[in-house]
Image (tube, coloured by chain):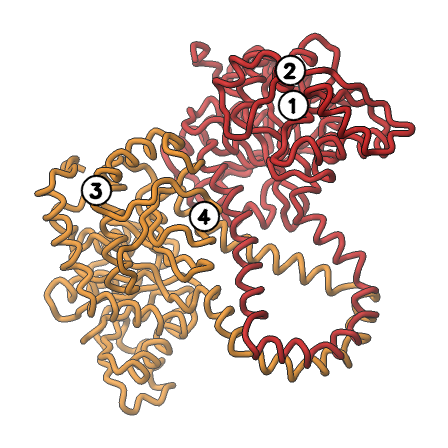
Chain colours: A red, B orange
Amino acid sequence: MKIAVDAMGSDHAPIPDVAGAVQAAKELGVEIILLGPQDVVQTELAKHDCTGARITVVHAPEVVKMEEHTIAVKSKKDSSMVIGMQMVRRGEADAFVSAGNSGAVMAAALFHLGRLKGVLRPAISALYPTVQGRCVVLDVGANTDCKPEYLVQFALMGRVYAERALGIAQPRIGILSNGEEEGKGSILVRETYELLKRSDHNFVGNVEGKDVPLGLADVVVTDGFTGNVLVKLSEGLVMAIARMIKRALTGGWRAKLALALMLPGAILLLPGIALLWPSIKRLIARLDPDETGGAPLLGVRGPVIIGHGRSNAVAIRNAIRAAMRAVEGDIVGAICDGLAEATTAGLPQMDETA
Amino acid sequence: MKIAVDAMGSDHAPIPDVAGAVQAAKELGVEIILLGPQDVVQTELAKHDCTGARITVVHAPEVVKMEEHTIAVKSKKDSSMVIGMQMVRRGEADAFVSAGNSGAVMAAALFHLGRLKGVLRPAISALYPTVQGRCVVLDVGANTDCKPEYLVQFALMGRVYAERALGIAQPRIGILSNGEEEGKGSILVRETYELLKRSDHNFVGNVEGKDVPLGLADVVVTDGFTGNVLVKLSEGLVMAIARMIKRALTGGWRAKLALALMLPGAILLLPGIALLWPSIKRLIARLDPDETGGAPLLGVRGPVIIGHGRSNAVAIRNAIRAAMRAVEGDIVGAICDGLAEATTAGLPQMDETA
């Protein structure tokens, strides 16, 4: 399996991008194609011990910057994003991973890889950590204004991803709403509800905001506006609570004195903490976005994983692992099949003009 | 000042509702009118020492149950919700507090108290805790599908509340969006942005989900669907993290042994914790929804505070305190004046048909 990796994607590119690619090549045994300006990538690569890692560099002289958008992708034909997508299209790579601007990755995928036949709108899917495990939330930013038919397809694509990449049998599919009862929700939600009720999914109906982290569904369908707010709010809330705790426990003579007083006690806690360490580590890993690595872009003609701009090497490595799972599970083929079945079953397939 | 309090509102009514009303009467010196079936309320009241508390009971034999909605309010003319709203309308009470079903409180307010002249849609406002203090988020559930003109009025109402009830001068007003840059957002957001840009508010533009808990705005305007998801997600996320931590630290012999090992150290921590206790208490109070007590319903002809169904006595007491602040700050009068000014200034005042 060959994964094409954008060496110029993340905020601190190419450092974490190259380091993560090397880690993936060594630890996961996957073949990596690194895309970026040859000299920049080679210089960065030289800093690593690449023994046993199968890595080739493909020259992509142009760089799409974080603040650039759709237009940059159109004009920069020699950028890592465009070349990466074209390699997937031509079968020279099995998947593409980039931690660049998600709008730009999305645009590059649409122009140079293309939508899957029958897909109305590709969607970016977040893997949201829950009390039970993980939940696929889509769309989280590709489509701000949606129609019910888009959301019906998001449900299918999310289901395929949950089944084949996360190994969840018969995933519970919910639609994000402002109340649990049937009949609650915006016009979009109520219309989508009716369509999903008639599908063969394991449809659990409306889920509220609180139900997402509590894990009441394995796939949560929503428009890209609300999904984006949901994902970013979660990030911000965790950051805000951390800052509030830090502020409460530090600063001022009181806090300093208290910390000094607590030192002997803290030392005595260490054996207990050591004993608990495996479960503490699992908990941290679960809440850590780097552990997921990236958000799959579903509905295009090849597996594409969009990493967070703030990705570190571990996040890039894990985004590559997510790409491998998408290839192994043949997500793209399964979405194709699912769409064909849905069409045969008479589920709505409108709006081919957009 | 007289505050009418729904004794039958909360999930565990009348216990927390009556207890909270007694607390408010004693601690805040406010006059309370308790509404509910006379015998039920009197029996509950008899359990408390009401020395020095000015509390009268008004008989409201009918009860709107938590699972009942708009229709119940229409038919139950002798319910606490309906009588409470009528008392505010007739000037027999200065404000109304209920921890009942928010849809039902809203319906009762619309039918029996009425919208303020010029208000297109009343909005439920959540007081969201942030790193900086508090932020007024509205709407959080009254209006699932909104028009730009509604959101423009939400901005005005939220501003008045922030200025007069929370004491924030020149509150920063943001619109919730899926990106910070101008031009990001759904059609609704982009159209509202244009209108708010022309207003005299201290408009800070788009705010993302993460910016809300980080406190980048004092008033965040959004449609009731997204606002509801935002508030409920925050609740659920805090619950989910607490459950995950609990699960990591308990259960199994390993955890039990670890806790036993940590006991001596934990005891040694106590003096330090005691020293930090004031700031820890402040932090907990900040994140505790009971501290806020309730969500003001803005845009109707009197101050109405909607408490959480899960309210305890402290939450009810604090909802009454919020009602007092709304009366003292003359929120209703100020919204009236603000709307009149906005009309004069040529801001949109459409859709009077709805």
Residue B109 placed where, x, y %?
Answer: 22, 55
- Structural distance between the alpha carbons of marks 4 and 2: 33 Å
| Above or below, comparing residue A347 to residue B311 in the picture | above
- Structural distance between the alpha carbons of marks 1 and 2: 8 Å
- Name the residue tied to disc 3: B199
Residue A96 placed where, x, y %?
Answer: 68, 21
For the view shown, which residue lies furthest in the right direction? Answer: A52
Q: Residues within 10 Å of mark 2 (few under 14, many from 20)?
A: many
| Above or below, comparing residue B163 to residue A168 in the picture | below
Residue name at image x 76 percent, y 30 percent = A44
Residue B211 numbered mark, or none:
4
Return the residue nearer the eye: A60 or B296.
Answer: A60
Tell me the mark number nearer the camera, choosing from 3 and 1.
Answer: 3
**Pointer 1 and pointer 4: residues touching (CB < 8 Å)?**
no
- Locate the C terminus of chain A and report the quarter of the image it occupies: top left
- Name the residue tied to disc 2: A85
Residue B271 placed where, x, y %?
Answer: 65, 84
Residue B300 numbered mark, or none:
none
- Structural distance between the alpha carbons of marks 3 and 1: 43 Å
Chain assignment, label 1: A
| Badges 3 and 1, same chain | no
Q: Residues within 10 Å of mark 1 (few under 14, many from 20)?
A: many
Q: Secondary structure at mark 3?
A: loop
- Name the residue tied to disc 1: A304
- Structural distance between the alpha carbons of marks 4 and 3: 22 Å
Q: Residues within 10 Å of mark 4 (few under 14, many from 20)?
A: many
Q: Secondary structure at mark 2?
A: helix
Chain assignment, label 2: A
- Type of the residue with mark 2: Met
